[in-house]
Amino acid sequence: MGNRCSVRPVTVSIGRIMPRTVPNVVALLVSTALAGVALGADGWKAGVAVTGITPEEPMWMSGYGSRDRPAEGTLHDLWAKALVLEDPSGSRAVLVSLDLVGIDRETSSSICETLKRRHGLERSGIALATSHTHTGPVVGHNLGAMYFLDAEGWERVRRYTAELEKRVAAVVGEAISSLAPCRLEWGNGQATFAVNRRNNPERDVPALRGAGKLVGPVDHDVPVLSIRGPDGTLRAVVFGYACHATVLSFYQWSGDYPGFAQRHLENDRPGAVALFFAGCGGDQNPLPRRSVELADEYGRRLAAAVDRVLDAPMAAIDGDLVTRYAEIPLPFDRIPSEEELEKDANNGANRYVKRRAQLLLDRLRDEGAIAPTYPYPVQLWRLGSGPRLVLLGGEVVVDYSLRLKRELGPESTWVAAYVNDVMAYIPSLRVLREGGYEGEGAMLYYGQPSRWDESVEERVVRAVLHLSHSAGHWSSARR
């Protein structure tokens, strides 16, 4: 199909993420174009930069426990993209989009501490958004109970993660250095390829779709933020969609359908950088799937939805940027005893049960206890007169975006998931009680001690509403 990348072998080296020529060219183009324009609308500024994060040595791929060997090639490169926004008062926020299945708390904290120290950013103004592509590498300890690597395999993960942290810090610095006046505008589109996988058997989806009988909650909104020079030239576009990036399951690096969508947007609008964030798609799949042609098709459809918004009148953003961040204690349903863990660690029937038990025993012996709660990250940005962007950690199911839009306003509320720390699935109370993979089963592969307590949904929603209230209304901050 058009614009499809050819497959090439992985370049074997010492395991570092090597610089790429294309990202440097893109960053230069964006920086130069933004720097040459006059003062932007209402005093906003933006800066964008891009860097490659494709592994340069064979590494284990993340997302599927059934894989039995490292990656064998590259369909298209993986990227880290940084967008820095600065409001008229000088407040800044940075969104980093990453072609990764997820990052863990340790990696996220290390990157954020570096950005705070090096660039003076506030923690509330740093959002690390992963696309959840299942054709990216293992990073840090994310999904660590799923993999059975030898010492060299884990060493490659460690090297990659350390270099990733350096490159993210560097690309944010490049984006800050390219800050220049801009116009911000926003709107919402629609794409309909996501399917609720809990309610529709995958093999039946084509027939159900044809008969108009797909069931289960979905969120087909496509939020779009455009960043233009004061002359109207598009410099960057941020967009999201609530659907797993699981079209592809082979052994070649790729950004899956979000990667294709970004490529199509950038190819069609030279000089612009496209950044994707995953919505609350924990229980949503792109169906049917399992081919490059389908990944490209879904990417085209998502890009087309973004294009329709960009080509129509969009609402201008003025006012101030307000950012909020909190970590709330999410309680587990129960903490297994040491005796239970010892029994599981010696259970020969399920290697994942054994691995989780051993990881928890190691934590128990190193720290003296297994914490009964997890520090869950909740973040909110109020983009002046524009939308409120809710940024949640973990694999959040679609019930959350639908509820938060009801609570805060359907048009002006955008909800991103897989941000800052992907520690587990985050089920709603409905999904938790129904059980299944999203409700409980996946906690095994994330190495968590049990399912969440039934207060999980209310705790997360209350935290978001509290941050939203503390961020105030744009009308009260009008300059």
Image (tube, rainbow, N blue to C red):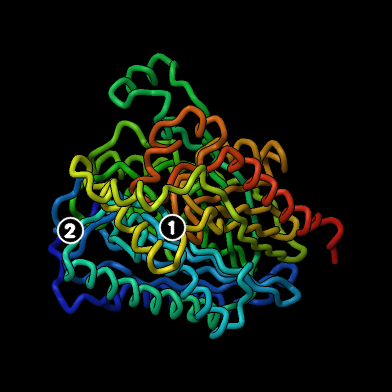
Instruction: Say which residue label 2 marks.
Output: 71
In the depicted structure, whether residue 469 falls above or below residue 33: above
On the image, the x and y values in percent for residue 158 come to: 29, 72
Work out how far the residue at label 2 is from the one at label 1, CA to CA, in angstroms. 19 Å
In the depicted structure, whether residue 262 falls above or below residue 309: below
Q: Residue at x 24, y 55 (%)?
A: 147
In the depicted structure, whether residue 152 falls above or below residue 246: below
Q: Secondary structure at mark 1?
A: strand
Q: Nearer the viewer, residue 453 or 246?
A: 453
Residue type at mark 2: give it. Ala
Instruction: Say which residue label 1 marks.
Output: 130
Q: Secondary structure at mark 2?
A: loop
The numbered disc on residue 148 is: none
Quadrant of the rendering where the C terminus is positioned: bottom right
Is residue 450 found left or right of 250 in the rendered image? Answer: right
Q: Quadrant of residue 156?
A: bottom left
On the image, the x and y values in percent for residue 294 come to: 29, 39
Residue lying at the far bottom in this picture: please name it.
Answer: 118
Q: Residue at x 26, y 47 (%)?
A: 352
Quadrant of the rendering where the N terminus is positioned: top left
Q: Nearer the viewer, residue 85 or 105?
A: 105
Is residue 355 found left or right of 416 in the rendered image? Answer: left
On the image, the x and y values in percent for residue 277 come to: 49, 54
Q: Residue at x 34, y 76 (%)?
A: 162
Q: How many marks?
A: 2
> Does residue 290 appear anywhere in the picture?
yes
Q: Earlier in the sequence, mark 2 or mark 1?
A: 2
Is residue 57 found left or right of 372 in the rendered image? Answer: left
Q: Nearer the viewer, residue 146 or 333?
A: 333
On the image, the x and y values in percent for residue 268 come to: 41, 55
